[in-house]
Amino acid sequence: MEQWSAKLEPGKTFSITPKLELTTLLSDELTTPLFGSSGRTWSTERLSEIGAELQQCRRAAAKRKDKQAANDLYKAMKELRTASKSLFRVERARVTADRDVQLLVDQPPTPGLSNLIALAQQALRGVDVQQELRSNRSFGPIGGNVANLQRAYDSLPEKDREALIARLGERGESANSEQQSIDQEWAEARQALAGVPADAQGLQKLQRLVQLPILDKVDRNEARAYRDAIQKKRWAIQSSLQKQQAQQAAAEAARPIDLIARLEALFSGDRVDTASLGGLQPGMPYSQAANTLERDWHFEGEFSPTGSPTKYAGTRQEWPRFKSERRNGGIVELAKLDDGQIGQITYTELYKAMVIDDVARNWLIQRFGEPDDMQASSESHLMSWNAGSRRLQVSLSHQLDMFDRSAGYKSQLAIAMWNEAYEDFLQAQNARCDEIRKIPRNEMSIEQSVWFFPNCPLGPGHHDTAGL
């Protein structure tokens, strides 16, 4: 790669289309021996891959302090970025020209089709056909596709243009022979519309019928009446299906949620002192926990003035899945110790229906044993386990605040996992809060003020505690 980049001749290019050029670094003789293919044929994706390889080589050259090689590689990368613009124009022109030619090839036989195809071939040879297109309105909207080919000429390699011209030529030869089948196709289309069933498959069939090529071959008034009949039938089917879907949605919304699958996805390990919550454990480094949330959970951190988020929620891409599963996706909060390790992990998730408490409680007991403490009411259950230096709490609640209820949520699962080190951390923090509270406000140092307000509850005697 270094030898290849050293062969760059700044300013020297070669033509790939009538208006586009590439650096000679991408010429056949310089690229085929090294990469196995000519640079003129590369896609922008391939170009990006090679750019990434050049970047790696440049870093290696810089590491061994080879300034000349690093400089050559940098210049080659710049040339590839410039070349990518030209290759992107070629790719885009190929796609649009292929689409326009296919639309022409798919046109039904009409008296002017042969002339239109001939104009398209001239456009691909660089002949200006705009005046003829403007003067012949019988071409209709399809004339715009010929104009597109005129514009694509400058960005298409000769090989591509010749292939498109050949495709158009084949269609021109067969255009006249298709006219005889139009009447039969039209009769079959009317028969198909009459037999459309009043269900979801019927809607799919209507969608196919409205796109039938025969509609562009018959009289416009007949085609319009056919499309109107399709629309009336579509409305009738949609109205019936919407009523059915509303009934099904109401039944689904009322169906209780079984949390077993969710709990199995969250918890790993069958002992409190070794369990993890989706790969998260107290005592792990904050950076590892953050990477786990971003990589495995597909969560992202909320803004934090410190630059290290402590609250994470699902990314926007995950919202449709959460909605289909009738949950909000949950929020994870990380409590850090002074040494940067995680002291406590808290996970809270809301559900759009009532959860089956008994099933969830039995699963938790089978997994972690009888809880050391259980607080229960008609609206909630809080289960607590202690094992060595580890603590675990799980809450199942139907007692939500007004905001969550107004959003349609009916149940909450909350999990807290922490260790003794976090309890000691809070004890020390609360003690320091109490000491600072005794200091008059006007005698408090700047360092004490900066530490106090984000770490201490404002009320006298109020202390932060671990768990839920």
Image: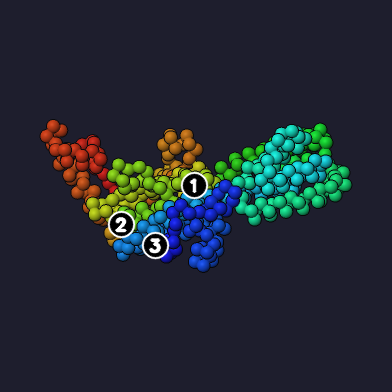
Residue 48 in the image, given as x and y percentages of width and height: 48, 55
- Amino acid beneath label 1: Gln
Identify the mark at residue 285; answer none if there is no mark: 2
Callout 1: helix, strand or loop?
helix
Q: Using the image as rendered, state which of residue 309 and residue 200 is in the foreground.
A: 309
Identify the residue position indicated by label 1 in the image: 317
| Upstream in sequence: badge 1 or badge 2 | 2
Q: Secondary structure at mark 3?
A: helix
Foreground of the two, 320 or 111: 111
Q: Amino acid at mark 3?
A: Cys
State if disc 3 and disc 1 touch (CB < 8 Å). no
The reply to whether residue 43 is visible in this rendering is: yes
Q: Are marks 2 and 3 in contact (CB under 8 Å)?
A: no
Q: Nearer the viewer, residue 77 or 224?
A: 77
Q: Amino acid at mark 2?
A: Pro
Q: Position of residue 115 (x, y in %)?
A: 78, 43
Counting from the top left corner in percent of width and height, residue 66 is at: 32, 63
Q: Secondary structure at mark 2?
A: loop
* Displayed quadrant of residue 207: top right
Of circles 2 and 3, the one toward us is 3
